[in-house]
Image (cartoon, helix red, strand yellow):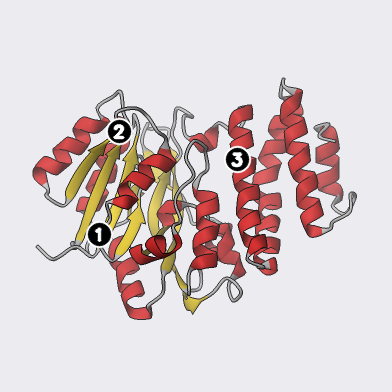
Amino acid sequence: MSRPVITVVVPGFDVAEFAGEAVASLEAQEMTAWRAVLVDDASHDATGAIFDEAVARDARFTVVRHRARRGLGAARNTGLELAETPFLAFLDADDRMTPSALGRWTETLERTGSDLVAGAYVRLRPTPAGGYAPGPVQPWVARSTAPARERVTLREHPDVSGNIVAWSKASRTALWRRTGIRFPVGMAYEDQVVAQQLYTRARSFDVIPDVVVEWRERADGSSITQRKGTLTILRDYLDALGGGLDVLDAAGHSAAIRSRIDLIRQLDLPPLIEIARTHPDDAYRRHLGAFVRALDERMSVPRGTDDARERALDAARLW
């Protein structure tokens, strides 16, 4: 077996229904020189057993267990610390990696010498038959990854700031060691800040239009991205969005800030405003309203500039 060149960290908590597909997607990789660290975050279901079965049949898998649940950020950090290969990637245990992903990532980084490469991704949506089917690459994803670019920086390609998920990327392990970047612990949407840290600290990065991961939207609505109507989740979500902007601001990337805020206004705010219209807790509206005002202040946008947004905000009584 070839010496591994990339480590894939796969955190999982109570995802037995899907973990087998995640593991199988790694075993189906066209590039075989990989290892995977499966991190069982104190699951109550059969997730750990599925991970154990993977280790039993394939020596490229290693299992690590948390005695108590520590969260997705901590699980990713656990696997990250065990990476000894030149390259590093992440895959959530309820998602699937496309067969060419590891090969495309590692070939690109080896050729360009960049610190980081980001690829496209699609959403796995529930089907009427009870399964899941991948959708198309969404426009904001395509804007960050197409056309292919090599050895660029955030100043040259500010739209990459919209690609904020951990599992769409591979990086040099040395980037994490050199910068000390780690995932925040104890909050949701922990990869948003980390993504901006990677972009701002990478000496150069690449983007490829290839779909590298199929990201699952669970039919039971239990995915973190499907629970934004909960006040605690909203707070983490907005803190992550704001934290990512803070990283870009501290590094002086004004074009990336503009690009990111444009995307937040287009993609993130409308569904939150719709939730706020009828939310029983006024604190939800106040928190969202404060975030929208902070966005305007960042961009020095006076109230009333965007009539459609203003009508929606006023209807939701966010002010």
Q: Quick check: can you spot residue 286?
A: yes
Residue 250 occupies quadrant? bottom right
Q: Circles 1 and 3: CB distance less than 8 Å?
A: no
Q: Residue 213's x, y, as percent? A: 38, 53
Near mark 2 (Cα within 10 A), the count class, few <14, some 14-19 or many ≥20, is some
Q: Residue 134's x, y, as percent? A: 41, 48
Residue sitting at x 58%, y 61%: 161
The mark nearer the N terminus, 2 or 3, is 2
Residue on which disc 2 sits: 66
Q: Is residue 44 left or right of residue 219?
A: left
Near mark 3 (Cα within 10 A), the count class, few <14, some 14-19 or many ≥20, is many
- Dot 3 lies on which element? helix
Q: Is residue 233 left or right of residue 287?
A: left
Residue 109 occupies quadrant? bottom left
Please name which of the two marks, 1 or 3, marks the residue nearer to the observer: 1
Quadrant (top left/top right/bottom left/bottom right) for the N terminus: bottom left
- Dot 2 lies on which element? loop
Residue on which disc 3 sits: 237
Residue on which disc 1 sits: 84
